[in-house]
Image (cartoon, helix red, strand yellow):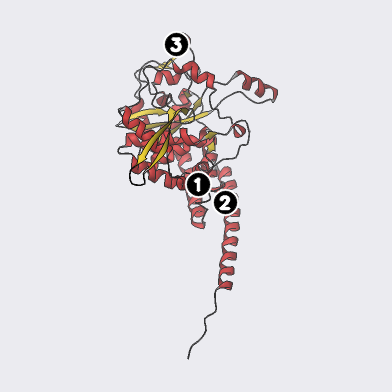
Amino acid sequence: MLYLKPSIGLILALFLAIASHSHASIDEKRQFQLDSISTNIPKESKQNLDQVHTFLHKNGRTDEERVWLFYGYIATHFKYDQKRKGERDAPIFSPEYTAQRRSGVCRDFSKVFLVLCQKSGIPCLEVTGRTPIPVWEIIGNWLHHMKSTYTHRWNVVKVNDTWMLMDPTWSSVKETQRIRHYDPKKKVNFTVLVKIPARIYYNPDPVFMMKTHAPIHPAFLLLSDSLPTFKTARKKETRQKFFCSNYHFSDTIDLIYAAKFPLFSKTYYTGCMKYSKTAAMLNNYEYELSLPVQKSARYKQPTLEQFDNALLQARELTTYIHSETGIAYTDKLKLFEEELAKKRAKLKKKLDAEEKAKKKKAPKKTSTQ
């Protein structure tokens, strides 16, 4: 599966189309302050997602400001991993490991954004869909006998009771400012670096977003009237065919979000099948199952309890999918259980060896009379 970061040319070509693009109700002075905060995350915390969240959450006064900070954090500190983009079997990274290496592809960035919002109790979902494929990539795929179907992930987030579109992958730093300050106590001048993210895809107008992003579920268009079909969503308006009108996208997303496993719920699955004839169910299932057994961040090494919880979660998810959609992933679950058992046994052996070595090094108690 491919994951794309847009070319600079594509961004510049679309830049003039965002006159209706909203930067929310945060005034310009506060926007700059928030960008300074997301730029200057303490050095010792930058690679620790838990500490990053604590810092950003504390410095955001409202959920709106926190979302601004989360988006700015990814735009400012993360680089796109071009190498993994074209790999058929690209390794899957946990959000914690992504934060540690500060590099990834769209599924990594959307997951990090999702986790940050979840930690702050802000409603957020990942969105799967299609985006344009550069001509050179189409040619490359053809030469390597690869399909040119393209998958991308972004987010919707609910702030002030309104669902908004976000694509943290399609972000970048548009400007860097150096602000000089004077510390009267230390009597020294110092410079503060502030990176200003390009927020073209931060709460963009849904019609503008649709020019490049076609979600597989119609609710994530965030449109109520004249919804285009999945195949024609990114075409010019005169060439679009219409799926339906008077669509209650907000209510539908609320229903999806309220489900125990949102992207595996009946509401999501039936909506996808009716609209795009794909729910990416298997891909999402394998991705979610694999997260607990992937390479861990240095600060968050796996535990036996974590593996046990991952097993329970996998079984619960598999049962839920079958009850909601009728799809059975019994064989996939069995493979996951076998892989998880091996990793758990390896960790148990390591922990036992460490405990044995610890006891061996411990000083022997001497009896006293």
Q: Which amino acid does label 3 sit on?
A: Glu
Q: Which of marks 1 and 2 is nearer the N terminus?
A: 1
Residue bearing mark 3: 237
Q: Disc 3 and disc 1: Cα gap in Å?
A: 43 Å
Q: Is mark 1 on a helix, strand or loop?
A: helix
Residue at 41% over, 37% down: 192
Q: Which of marks 3 and 2 is nearer the N terminus?
A: 3
Between disc 1 and disc 2, the foreground one is 2
Task: Work out whether 188 lies above or below 175.
Answer: below
Q: Which of 146 and 85 is in front in this view?
A: 85
Is residue 14 in sight in this rendering?
Answer: yes
Q: Which of marks 3 and 1 is nearer the N terminus?
A: 3
| Image location (x, y in percent) of residue 142 | 67, 22
Q: What residue type is labelled 1?
A: Ala
Q: What element carries label 3?
A: helix
Residue at 43% over, 21% down: 209
Between disc 3 and disc 1, the foreground one is 3
| Image location (x, y in percent) of residue 47 | 49, 45
- Which label belongs to residue 340? 2
Residue bearing mark 1: 314
Q: Quadrant of residue 249?
A: top left
From the image, which quarter does the N terminus lie in? Answer: top right
| Image location (x, y in percent) of residue 351 | 56, 62
Between disc 3 and disc 2, the foreground one is 3
Q: Disc 1 and disc 2: Cα gap in Å?
A: 11 Å
Local packing at callout 1 (Cα closer than 10 Å; few below 14, some 14-19, many 20+) is some
Residue at 58% over, 65% down: 354
Q: Which of 267 and 29 is in front in this view?
A: 29
Q: Disc 3 and disc 2: Cα gap in Å?
A: 49 Å
Q: What element carries label 2?
A: helix
Horizontal side of 224 relative to 228 (left or right) equals left
Is residue 171 in sight in this rendering?
Answer: no
